[in-house]
Image: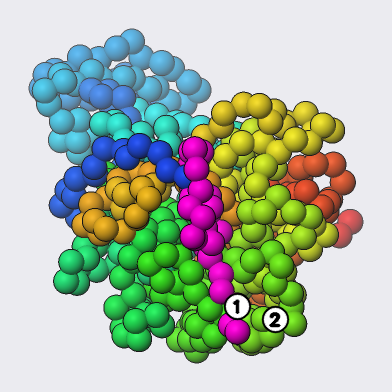
Amino acid sequence: MLATLAFAAVLCVGASQLAASTRADARVRPPARAAAPPPARATAPAPDYVPGEVIVGYGSTPADAQQVAHAARVMGVRATAAQSEPGATQQILRVPRDRSIWPVIAKLRRRPGVRYAIPDYIAHAAGWIPNDPGNTHRRQGWQQLQWNFLAPSGIDAADAWAHMFAVHRPGGKGVVIAVLDTGVAYRNWKQFRKSPDFTTTHFVDPHDFVAGNAYPLDREGHGTFVAGMIAESTNNGIGLTGLAYGATIMPVRVLDADGNGDSVTIARGIRYAVNHGAQVINLSLVFDSSVTAAQVPNIISAIDFAHRRGVVVVAAAGNDSTTHLDYPAAAPGAISVGATTSDRCLAGYSDIGAKLDLVAPGGGDDAALPDDPDCHPFRNLPSVHQMTFNDFESLEPGLNPDRFGFPGSYGTSMAAPEVTATAALVIATRILGPHPSPDQILAHLEQTATPLGGAQPNDDYGWGLINAGAATAPLPTASPAR
């Protein structure tokens, strides 16, 4: 009999479990529905500057000062006191708030003696903060929900995004990531609707191995959640953010509307992704903890095939609170990912063990680890949020595949895509060369991870918490020989 599996997600804390399902489901009340504004380009915003201020630098001669003073009077702007430095003088001109500073700058730059005329630019803390509002009506409001992407408790997405701009591959542009899951809300088709926050996300080579067609539309919401964490459109003024938002998603449906699938279908999906050009494969799914390697040789063989072809395979460790990993994460060729909480503690549900490679934010409550000062098991901690079906947290998710919101979920399903997206960003940076091997990428992710739990590696955290900012930073250059 073929082994079956379920996705590696646990939804927000509730009162009961469905006895007839292999999933651990508990639901919360639905969030507000997300509207679908017009598409917008996901590009870096223009730098911020002080409104109504122009900085003018000019020579130190009286003639140079007269040129600037005359220009200010002609243009009807007010000059502040000059700030003199050796060989040059700088002055701030105040432009009325109802006027643009740019015509003033253009005219000043044509004046003799003017060395520069620029806005008074504003510096920010390191990293790039997109404008996506989340469930607020404010720019950058996504940070209220996506704690898992922030530096203090999560993966430092802001620095990773800034590093990608520096190498001219925003959001991991050019890398193909296969999401093997319940499908993805990637297009309109019959009763299905495209997620409002996939407006600029690219998709390629979709396939449905459950229905046997080329339309792997999500029937449950899990796959859309996972794909959104990886590559949801970002800085488009809609919804939340995706870590590798410039990457291309290959939607491959291998799980049915109940979140279950068999080993034959999963193995076919893995080989399909490899043969169609995927560079990273995300497996946010697990077999029962009792399943052994001898029972899923086809899965292990498919992952080995991917590994030999240079494809990175990332898999969720499992949600059984056991001291061994579930398959496919336990397969030798997979990067196994456990889950942490907003406290940077191991999540109480996460599987652990000597084969664990890394951890990433999965949400939920802390594990009871007496020797870990970051762990507080009696606190009520947040889930992870992403745009997917409004009814994702209901007892029958997927009944309304045209209504979207920001439901909360927790599990190693949510941790794995953060590692998947980081691996894609590393590939895009080319800091390991144009075609790094899966082993090189894993070693780099381990070396740049944030250590947790004492000596590295350890059974609870592997090599530590994935750090997208550190993983995408330029490699240090060797010091010259003396």
Q: Is residue 136 visible?
A: yes
Question: Magenta-highlighted stretch: main secondary structure?
Answer: loop
**Which badge, 1 or 2, comes first in the chain's sequence?**
1
Q: Position of residue 274 (x, y in %)?
A: 53, 84
At a point 33% along the width and 20% down the height, the residue shown is 91
Check the image and name the residue furthest to the top: 81
Relative to 364, is 326 above or below? Answer: below
Label annotation for residue 3: 1
At a point 72% along the width and 62% down the height, the residue shown is 325
- Label 2 crowd bin: few (<14), some (14–19), many (20+), radius 10 Å: some
Q: Quadrant of the N terminus?
A: bottom right
Q: Position of residue 388 (x, y in %)?
A: 34, 53
Find residue 318 and report its image quarter: bottom right
338 magenta-colored = no
For mark 2, give the secondary structure: helix
Where are the magenta residues, as a range?
1-25
Find residue 45 and report its image quarter: top left
Q: CA distance from mark 1 to mark 2?
A: 7 Å
Judge from the rendering whether residue 137 lies leftward or rightward of residue 246; answer left or right.
Answer: left
Marks 1 and 2 close (CB-CB < 8 Å): yes
For mark 1, give the secondary structure: loop
Residue type at the position of mark 1: Ala
Q: Is residue 112 visible?
A: no
Q: Position of residue 16 (x, y in %)?
A: 50, 43
Location of mark 2 (residue): 295
